[in-house]
Amino acid sequence: MVDNFSIAISHLLIALAAWRLVWRADLDKEAPPEKDKLGSGFFQPRRRPGTEERSDA
């Protein structure tokens, strides 16, 4: 009897914690990531050896 009660209590506490996490409002709000200056992927301009990166700022 005590074993079943302790298992039920622990499972109910885990379910309560999960329920509270699911209904938090701040979990759905996230700032978008900043864009890369150069980017990544296959079709990116290549830097030639001996040239420096220009900054137009």
Image (tube, helix red, strand yellow):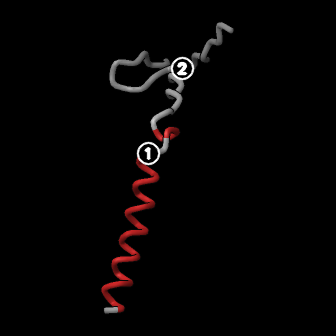
On-image quarter of the C terminus: top right
Q: Is residue 11 above or below residue 28?
A: below
Quarter where residue 52 is shown: top right
Is 43 displayed left or right of 30 in the figure?
A: left
On-image quarter of the N terminus: bottom left
Q: Mark 2–mark 1 contact, CB under 8 Å?
A: no
Label 2 and label 1: CA atoms lie apart by: 36 Å
Q: Is residue 27 above or below residue 49?
A: below
Q: Which residue is mark 2?
A: 37
Is disc 2 placed on a helix, strand or loop?
Answer: loop
> Who's the residue at 34% across and 18% down the image?
43
Q: Which residue is mark 1?
A: 23
Query: Which numbered marker is on residue 43?
Result: none
Give, as a three-letter code, the residue at label 1: Trp
Is 42 displayed left or right of 51 in the figure?
A: left
> Who's the residue at 50% across and 33% down the image?
29
> Who's the residue at 42% across and 26% down the image?
40
Is disc 1 placed on a helix, strand or loop?
Answer: loop
Image coordinates for residue 35, horizontal then vertical, percent: 50, 22
Image coordinates for residue 53, horizontal then vertical, percent: 60, 17
Mark 2 neighbour density, 10 Å: few (under 14) some (14–19) many (20 or more)? few
